[in-house]
Amino acid sequence: MAVKVVVEADKPALLSRLRVLIQQVADGVPAGQKWVKVGLSGGSLVGALAGVLPGVQTDWSRWRFFFCDERVVPFDDADSTYGCYKAQLLPRLNLQEEQFVVIDPALPAGRAAMDYSSKLSEYFGEALPEFDLLLLGMGPDGHTCSLFPGHQVLQEKSRWVAEVTDSPKPPPCRVTLTLPVLNNARLALFPISGKEKADTVLKVLHPEAGEALLPAALVKPSKGDVVWLLDSGAASLLPK
């Protein structure tokens, strides 16, 4: 596992590098591999990817998009991550809705997590899922996916997908990939911008001795890489 930190001058430069990194993933997937399997996150990443992905040269019909976490709300709810991608990304790329592997929002969170795990097994079989690319965000508290500081889901060792019914950030009910899945990815990529994230970036990349690691700091793929793609604001507190 390698941790790489890439710093760009500003957000446009960060987005340009993001496109290059995704292009490298697209080019690196063996021709004999049926699907390119990517995990998506929500928030500001939705708009960023809607702007970046149309510039990637690839056979999009091979791509399958999963969700690193999802809110258990109807797809037409403003909080639905899939709903945001459907509105912002689908019109810009020649993608079909069937290329997105989504939760069943009609189920309670626990059953939705079990159902989503079954959907993953249709693409990954019985082995621990190995994503070609996970696109991850990070909140100001250091959470990633719906893995929040101090939450019991951080201790999950066997399930691929877990429910969260007490999210400190609304809405409360979510499903999330667990750390074993995150840490089996070929590439975990954190595109982070803005000076308001600088303190959290510092705590993740240079934790104080004796302090509990923030969830984002626990993403360390055992066989793959993790790349922190930062703009100068997000990197402003890192040691020079």
Image (spheres, helix red, strand yellow):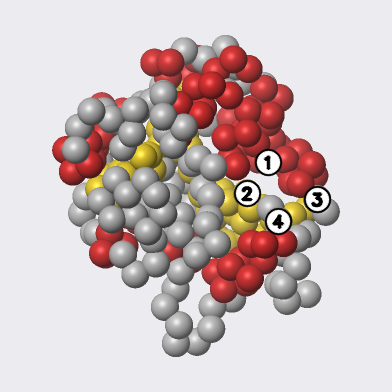
In this rendering, the label closer to the viewer, 2 or 1: 2
Asked which quadrant contains residue 77, the reply is: top left
In which quadrant of the rendered image does the C terminus lie? bottom right
Q: Amino acid at mark 3?
A: Asp
Which residue position is annotated with label 4?
194
Amino acid of disc 2 = Pro
Tell me the CA gap for discs 1 and 3.
Answer: 12 Å
Please indicate whether residue 11 sits to the left or right of residue 134 in the image.
right
Asked whether 87 or 17 is in front, the reply is 87
The alpha-carbon separation of the residues under discs 2 and 1 comes to 7 Å
Residue 219: x and y in percent read 45, 59
Closest to the camera, between mark 1 and mark 4, is 4
Disc nearest the viewer among 4 and 2: 4
Which residue is the extreme one toward the bottom? 210
Give x and y (percent) for residue 211: 45, 82
Disc 1: which residue: 18
- Badge 1: few (under 14), some or many (20 or more) residues near its Cα, within 10 Å? many
In the rendered image, which residue does mark 2 sit on?
191
Q: CA distance from mark 4 to mark 2?
A: 10 Å
Residue at left offset 47%, top offset 13%:
96
Q: Dot 3 corresponds to which residue?
A: 10
| Drawn side of residue 105 relative to residue 9, left or right | left
Q: Residue at x 69, y 29 (%)?
A: 51
| Within-10-Å neighbours for mark 4: few <14, some 14–19, many 20+ | some
Q: Given contact means CB atoms under 8 Å apart, are the residues at marks 2 and 1 in contact?
A: yes
Cα distance in 3D space between marks 3 and 2 = 12 Å
Distance from Cα at disc 4 to Cα at disc 3: 9 Å
Q: Position of residue 157 (x, y in %)?
A: 23, 59
197, above or below 125, in the image: below
Q: Which sits earlier in the primary sequence, circle 3 or circle 2?
A: 3
